[in-house]
Amino acid sequence: MSTAPRTLLQHANAPLHPSALSKSAVIVIDAQEEYRSGRLPLAGIEDAIATIAELLAVARQHQAPVFHILQQGRPGGLFDPETSFARAIDATAAKDGDQIVVKSLPNAFAKTSLDDLIRATGRTELIIAGFMTHMCVSATTRAALDAGYRSTIVADATATRALPDPLQGGTIAAAELQRNALAALADRFAIVVRDVAALTKG
């Protein structure tokens, strides 16, 4: 008789509840115009932007520290710092009290001060949102586990894009890639919740 698959977190009897806002720092990754009006438009980005804005409002209401991660590319390339495409999307931009961390690699902890800044807040858990799900959200969430953080990803506050299939040819649809990326992260690296409401239940 077949049994339903279980995540590694379930096998380990790890806690499966979302991170509490009272214990968490909120990380918004690469909410920048390159993904909205530039060369890397993402599927469902407008809905994701609205959810990130909702998450930020709730985080500030609960006085959770907020960190905005901004990708900085090279002149002439993606996220060119001399263009508007590297600019934060207005609806998700930093406000007074938020901190901005500039990165050059997919993992927001790599070659940045993010770990030190989070530890200075005393928070031990992360609530993660932003772009792209399969790339910088994934890399940062995986690194967060190595650094000792417990993470929660708000699925509706993330998005990605279609990619070429390197094995079968053709295209992997953005929705399929999004689902698979979140499933992989939910196996071991994060609790994945649908929306912001899941953070305030109970």
Image (cartoon, rainbow, N blue to C red):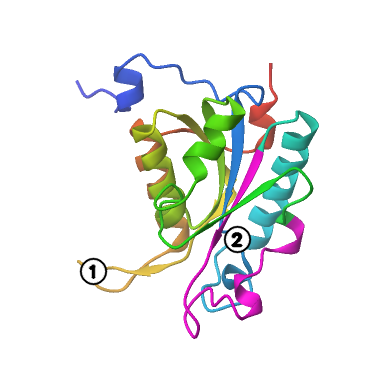
Labels 2 and 1: the sequence-earlier one = 2
Q: Is residue 144 above or below residue 100?
A: above
- Which one is in front, 96 or 27? 96
Q: Is residue 114 left or right of residue 60?
A: left
Q: Residue at x 48, y 72 (%)?
A: 73
Name the mark on residue 44: 2
Neighbour class for label 2 at 10 Å: few (<14), some, many (≥20)? Answer: some
Q: Position of residue 2 (x, y in %)?
A: 22, 24
Element under label 2? loop
Q: Residue at x 47, y 77 (%)?
A: 74
- Which one is in front, 79 or 173? 79
Name the mark on residue 13: none
Q: Is residue 164 left or right of residue 87?
A: left
Q: Position of residue 196 (x, y in %)?
A: 67, 36
Q: Is residue 90 left or right of residue 193?
A: right
Neighbour class for label 1 at 10 Å: few (<14), some, many (≥20)? Answer: few
Q: Residue at x 35, y 20 (%)?
A: 10
Q: Is residue 22 above or below residue 156?
A: above
Look at label 2 and name its amino acid. Answer: Gly
Which residue is labeled 1 in the image?
166
- Which one is in front, 201 or 100? 100
Contact flag, marks 2 and 1 (Cβ < 8 Å): no
**Magenta-highlighted residues:** 66-91
Q: Quadrant of the N terminus?
A: top left
Q: Position of residue 55 (x, y in %)?
A: 70, 41
Furthest-bottom residue in this view: 76
Q: CA distance from mark 2 to mark 1?
A: 24 Å
Look at label 1 and name its amino acid. Answer: Pro
